[in-house]
Amino acid sequence: MISLSNLHKSFGSQTVLNGLDLEIPAGQITAIIGPSGEGKSVLIKHMIGLMQPDQGRIEVDGESILGIRRSQLNRIREKFGMLFQNAALFDSMNVFENVAFPLQEKTALSKSEIRDRVISALEDVGLKNVEHKYTDELSGGMKKRVGLARALLLNPKIILFDEPTTGLDPIIKRAIHQLIKDTHAKFGFTAVVVSHEIPEIFDVAQNVAMLYKGRILQFGTAAEIRHSQDPVVRQFVSGSLDGPIQMV
Ligand SMILES: Nc1ncnc2c1ncn2[C@@H]1O[C@H](COP(=O)(O)OP(=O)(O)OP(=O)(O)O)[C@@H](O)[C@H]1O
């Protein structure tokens, strides 16, 4: 589905990805965990062609997304939905307009069809009667839901979630995690979730990849990573100050 091989990416003298290999299984939820600043956001930006590697291969459904024409890349990008860290809503638009935006841009649907789809997508994420609210009238959890409704709308094959629950209270966190699981069960997309929510993410994702020092240190089922014997993974999962991961 998404296949990354031998990815290298540096910013000036800082090497972020250093020969990374990763296969994201189709139709499943895969979490990417790892210490802050290790390159998790950089990694998912590569998956959708928002960043280009210095070296390596990236394939989506067997097609390379590197060195291709803009129009080809845009066609491949239509397979993706993305929920950015800050939900990336437009401040100048209300909820309805934010969610309707991709439909208006990408389809020739009539106004009433767009309206029906937007309302139904908002219902899928548990939002009702908020269409006329503006971004600054929404709580953090509502913004994430609106972002998720927008990401779901075009029925993407793949959804990338960059820290979907950061900054939310524990109950809303749980609600968003449940929503990711429920919408995944309903729509069957391939999901990649960058997350710091340990241990909660082990109940959301089927697979977990631990990013460390520019590579995937370990990839396995949620249970395998949770009970990993690798000293780095163990320290990270337990949140211990003692171990090979050094605080700067
Ligand atoms: N466009 C850029 N230009 C220069 N440096 C960048 C750029 N994007 C990311 N970096 C650097 O790459 C490193 C990895 O950043 P990234 O945001 O991917 O980390 P992360 O693992 O997602 O961190 P966190 O868990 O804190 O969100 C950081 O040191 C960051 O400063």
Image (cartoon, rainbow, N blue to C red):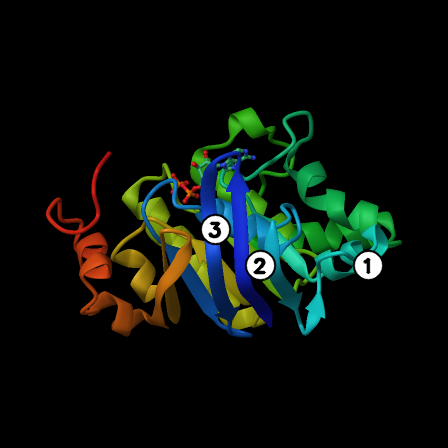
Q: Which residue is mark 1?
A: 72
In the displayed structure image, the side of residue 167 where residue 227 appears, left or right: left
The disc label shown at residue 17, or none: 3
Give the mark toward the camera: 1 or 3.
3
* Separation of residues labelled 3 and 2 (CA atoms): 22 Å
Residue 16 higher or lower than 28, as above or below: above
Residue at the spot x=82%, y=59% of the render?
72
Q: Which residue is mark 2?
A: 159
The disc label shown at residue 126, or none: none
The amino acid beneath tag 1 is Gln
Q: Secondary structure at mark 1?
A: helix
In the displayed structure image, the side of residue 75 where residue 15 appears, left or right: left
Look at the image and tell me whether residue 125 can be seen.
no
Packing grade of label 3 (10 A; few <14, some 14-19, many >=20) is: many
Look at the image and tell me whether residue 200 can be seen.
yes
Between 53 and 118, the one nearer to me in the picture: 53
Q: Secondary structure at mark 3?
A: strand
Q: Earlier in the sequence, mark 3 or mark 2?
A: 3
Residue 205: percent from left, percent from top: 39, 66
Quadrant showing the N terminus: bottom right
* Separation of residues labelled 1 and 2 (CA atoms): 19 Å
Residue at the spot x=49%, y=46% of the render?
41
Q: Secondary structure at mark 2?
A: strand
The amino acid beneath tag 2 is Ile
Question: Residue extending furthest front?
Answer: 13
Residue 31: percent from left, percent from top: 41, 61
Q: Earlier in the sequence, mark 1 or mark 2?
A: 1
Mark 2 CB lies closer than 8 A to ligand 1: no
Give the mark toward the camera: 3 or 2.
3
